[in-house]
Amino acid sequence: MLELIGLNKRYKGEAEAALDGVHLRVQTGEFVAVLGRSGAGKSTLIRCVNRLVEPDAGRVLWQGRDLTAMSAAELRRARMRIGMVFQHYHLLPRLSVLTNALAGRFGAMPRWRSLPGWYTASERALAAAALREVGLEALGRRRVEELSGGQKQRVAIARVLVQQPELLLGDEPISSLDSVTAARIMRHIASLHRERGMTVLLNLHDVAVARAHASRIIGLAGGRIVYDGSPEALDETALARIYADEAAPDLPIHRRDRG
Ligand SMILES: Nc1ncnc2c1ncn2[C@@H]1O[C@H](COP(=O)(O)OP(=O)(O)OP(=O)(O)O)[C@@H](O)[C@H]1O
């Protein structure tokens, strides 16, 4: 289970909190999509889970272990089982597309592992299959810094396909992809979720994509959870609450607490 307990975050110099007392329990094997307007706090929420952003208060537990209390070394080890698809995050720009995909096998990759020759044939086959899946099979030898934004995003997704993490965190993972590639990637994430029981927590800007794949939707507004329920229950009223100009904290919050 992934458990967020009373997460608060206010960035320096900002009047409003980006996260304002977020409590959330995600059961192992759930597929959760986070929706909200620009500035609602979605990226901050996802980034607090793996401590790319340090929360001011609150805790994050993954399988009972407190990520927020871990040392840097412990966190690095824990992150090996947490896949992350964030824009501009953690690709190795000077290395090849194939090497970046292979890096999914290991968390932080030491320099001496930076050549494809270091990996086993089966690891290379897995990486090649992942690159095929994201349509980059012809670009395996290219340096990542020479790719477009959307291509880099696909490398990040290939890395996660190789990593096969227990928990996948994504910050709009398909936002800069064409619709055909985006649909393919979402189907692949959904199959990892279904077949391997991977827990998924993704920010998505497309309500239809969230409805199509997620088993649960979280709506954020003004750093607070204003909707927590099934895709089926996400009706016009719920959408109005999530996408309203201002969060309306006085309204009763539809909340389906689990666990
Ligand atoms: N590094 C930062 N420094 C200062 N303020 C920040 C920083 N990152 C985010 N914020 C502010 O925190 C609030 C929440 O931002 P966040 O990026 O989490 O929202 P979001 O829902 O992901 O938005 P978007 O969909 O536009 O990415 C916003 O008001 C934003 O301006």
Image (cartoon, rainbow, N blue to C red):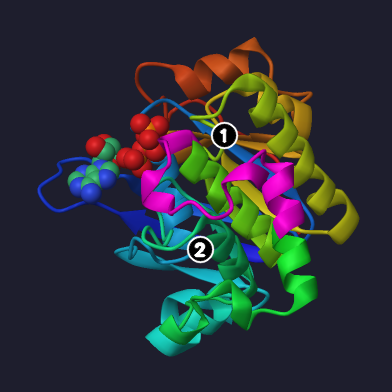
Q: Is residue 148 magenta?
A: yes
Looking at the image, how many numbered discs can be counted on the residues? 2
What amino acid type is highlighted by mark number 2? Ile
Dot 2 crowding, Cα within 10 Å, few <14, some 14–19, many 20+: some
**For ligand 1, which image quadrant applies?**
top left
Cα separation between marks 2 and 1: 28 Å
Q: Secondary structure at mark 2?
A: strand
Residue receiving disc 2: 5
Please give the name of the residue rendered at 49% of the width and 61% of the height, measured from the top-left corner: 49
- Of badges 2 and 1, the one in the foreground is 1
Q: Is residue 29 magenta?
A: no
In the rendered image, is residue 40 in sight?
no
- Image height check: is 124 above or below 148? below
Residue 73 at what x, y percent from top left? 44, 88
Please give the name of the residue rendered at 44% of the width and 41% of the height, measured from the top-left corner: 42
Q: Secondary structure at mark 1?
A: loop
What amino acid type is highlighted by mark number 1? Ile
Q: Quarter-wise, where is residue 106 in the image?
A: bottom right
78, 146: nearer the viewer: 146
Q: Are marks 2 and 1 in contact (CB under 8 Å)?
A: no
The residues colored magenta run: 128-150
Residue labelled 2 has its Cβ within 8 Å of some atom of ligand 1? no
- Image height check: is 126 above or below 113? above
